[in-house]
Every structure is written in structure tokens, then in C-alpha cells.
Amino acid sequence: MALSSISQSDNLFDRRMKKLGIIVVVLLMSQGIYAQKWGYIDAAYILQMMPEYENVQQELDKVSQQWQEEIASMRLEVQSLYDAYQAEEVLLTDEMKEERMAAIKEKEETSQVFHRKMFGYEGLFFLKKKELLKPVQDKLFDAVEKIAKAKRLELVFDKSGDYAIIYSNPVHDYTDFVLEELGLGDKTDVIE
């Protein structure tokens, strides 16, 4: 549930950036830059082919699972305190009821704060993901830049996200070149 909210905020940011990119391209084209050479790649596909990315995903899954277990443990503790309170409620004085409910509420708030700290907007999970992905993304971007310079491309689009390209001619797909540059291409495939 928390991971989906992180993904939604990441997707919203990605969509906004891609819309901005499309606007820039349309503006450039409207300024008479029709003859510029461009290409596209499928960054999501390339990342999935990179062993480093798989290692990052495994590390993130491990960290996430550990924090999810801590949160679940905290919630179980809150639930057991509440169950004990309900079982003894008829025997407690009003003052004791207030004290128990305050303790339960405090534990519940502690659990929520921990959850937000780990998985909230720019929480520790987000920061860990950013830290672990940076070297992988840098490697991909360096390979794309090298291919773009070698192929004399002015623009390279990422077609793996929303709104990046509505239609694309496969002639302009440079994914295989980037995979080859990273040493991840199909050895039997010949790129012309």
C-alpha cells in the first residue's frame, strides 16, 4: 500500500517531466529545426537487462521487507494492547481507561510516524532507492550519450514511460545499440 503511493508520486513526476519534454520538442520543431536527427530507447527494458539494476531491486526489496515487518510488528503490538483493553474495560476505572487509551494512541502514532519516515514522500526508502539507482542510471546515461554522439543524434527519447512518444518508427530505436555498448546485447544479433 505504501509502495503504491510512492510509485504514484514517482509516476506523476515522470508524466509531468515527459509532458514538459514533449512541449520542448514541439517548440523546437516550430522554430524550424525539422532536419534534426533523433532516436529513442526503451530505458525500462535496458534497465531490466542490466545485472546492476537487478541487484538494486533485490536490495530495495530486502530493505522494504525489513521495514514492512517492523511496521507490522508495531501494528500487532497496538492491536494486542487494544484487545487487552477491551477485555479488561469493564474492570477499569475511568482514569485507568484514559491511561490505557493514551498508551494505545501513542503506540499507534509511533507506528504511523515510523511508516511515514520509512515510506513517506522523500522517506528513507525513497532516499535509499535514489542512492542505489544513481550509479546504474549514470551508466545508462553515459552509454546513451556515447551512442547519441556516435550516431550524431540531436535528441534521444525514452519510450518506456507515459506520453513520451505517441508514435515511433522502429528505424529510430537505439535500444540495441545501448545494450551492445553496455555489453548486454544479443551476441547473435547483428546491428547495422
Image: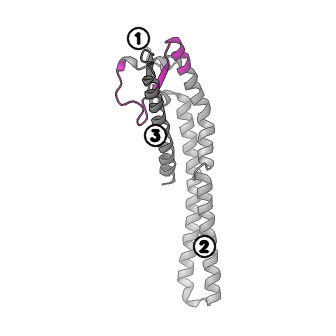
Who's the residue at 55% across and 60% down the image? 72
Residue holding disc 1: 190
Rendered residue at 64%/86% (across/down): 96
Q: Position of residue 115 (x, y in %)?
A: 59, 57
Give the CA distance from mark 3 to mark 2. Answer: 39 Å
- Asked if the residue under mark 1 is in contact with the one under mark 3, i.e. CB atoms within 8 Å, the reply is no
Q: Which mark is residue 105?
A: 2
Residue at (48%, 40%) from the top-left corner? 16
Given the current orientation, which residue lies at the most extreme front position?
31
Which amino acid is tagged 2?
A: Lys
Q: Are marks 2 and 1 in contact (CB under 8 Å)?
A: no
The disc, 3 or 2, on the residue closer to the chain's N-terminal end is 3
User: Which circle's residue, 2 or 1, is located before the other in the chain?
Assistant: 2
Residue type pointed to by label 1: Val
Q: Is residue 78 above or below residue 25?
A: below
The residue tagged with tag 1: helix, strand or loop? loop
Q: Amino acid at mark 3?
A: Arg
> Quadrant location of residue 57?
top right
- Give neighbour class at mark 3: few <14, some 14-19, many 20+ (Cα, 10 Å): some
Please tell me which residue lies in front, 180 or 186: 180
User: Disc 3 versus disc 1: distance between alpha carbons?
Assistant: 34 Å
Residues 168 and 3: in front is 168
Residue 73, x across and y down, in percent: 58, 62
Above or below: residue 140 compared with residue 19: above
> Label 3: which residue?
15
On the image, the x and y values in percent for residue 75 come to 56, 65
Between disc 3 and disc 2, the foreground one is 3
Magenta residues span 144-170
